[in-house]
Amino acid sequence: MFVLQNSLILEILYKSLKKNIPESTKVYGALFNIKNKNPFKMEVLVDAWPDYQMVITRPQKQEMKDDQDHYTNTYQIFTKATDKLEEVLSCSQVINWEKTFQIQGCQEGLDEAVRKVATSKSVQVDYMKNMLLMPELSKKHKTSSNYNMELFEMHKVDDNNKKGNFSNMFLDTSHAGLINEHWAYGKNERSLKYIERCLQDFLGFGVLGPEGELVSWIVMEQSCELRMGYTIPKYRSQGKMSQVLHYLEKYLSQKEIPFYAHRAGYEEKHLKILKNVDFKICPCGWHQWKCTPKKYC
């Protein structure tokens, strides 16, 4: 595996990966941000070029300075050759098995290789499989020549989208504490720093209540996934998350930014919300392997 750096080649790879969506969704989204000022300081590895069989996106080495920060230490993987995956994952130049990290992908076929290598390295694996949710309608996500990360610039309350005593707004790092407090995979100092970084570099959007308090929100992360969605219990079943998703779907589509989400479980009310905003469930699923060396267990 080697790192791709040439901007023209990255653009060619990006267009190629689009043909393999939804299985390539995680690396496709990460590559979008890498091509556009790379605020999360990531890099792309391939096994060959131009006839690649495997693509991995990961943080640059200097970004993985905290050995237990699995939020930052995240690898996204797409492969056309699962039979070669075990050999690639075993290579210390590709994956640093001395740290706690996550592997994310949209291919169930990754599981066997991840587990085999983890066992050989005496690393504990915590696996999650959830629904992968993609926009139903075909979206064109072409990057314009004048694109820059100002797309993610924070804005004031949107006065044109007020509904009753509720209003839409783009979020900033001042909201990180509240989001961290309610994120099921957060509630710790490392997750707080990660959320702050996502809000600093990417898009966060929410709905303010009658007293100006944040009541419903979603945050985009380094692979263009919409995560950390939450609505304060008092305001549930009032369409607030639908309001957030409707606005984001329109905004991201206009800006030609790819987006998707995942969801655990099949609760009817949640599926109804997603159906209302034209999301579909992809059969390949959303997969994550959290890998923890025994010294950190």
Image (cartoon, rainbow, N blue to C red):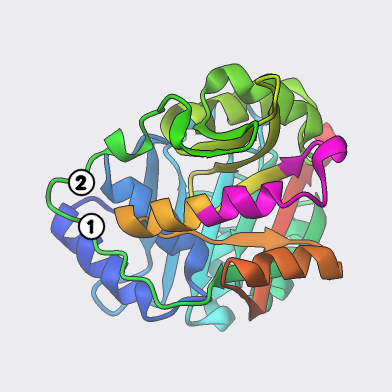
Residue 146, position in %: x, y?
13, 46
Disc 1, disc 2: CB below 8 Å? yes
Q: Which residue is mark 1?
A: 143
Pick the quarter of the image with the N terminus: bottom left
Of 108 and 170, the residue lying toward us: 170
Amino acid on which the number 2 mark rests in the picture: Tyr
The residue sitting at 17% across, 53% down in the picture is 6
Which residue is found at the position 28% from the left and 34% from the top? 150
**Residue at point 58%, 16% (across, down):** 174
Asked whether residue 130 appears in the rendered view, the answer is no
Residue type indicated by callout 1:
Thr
> What is the CA distance from the residue labelled 1 to the residue labelled 2?
6 Å
Q: What span is colored magenta in the figure?
A: 230-246
Image location of residue 181, percent across then percent down = 79, 27
Of 218 and 47, which appears nearest the observer?
218
What residue is disc 2 on? 147
The image shows residue 123 at horizontal and vertical percentages of: 78, 50
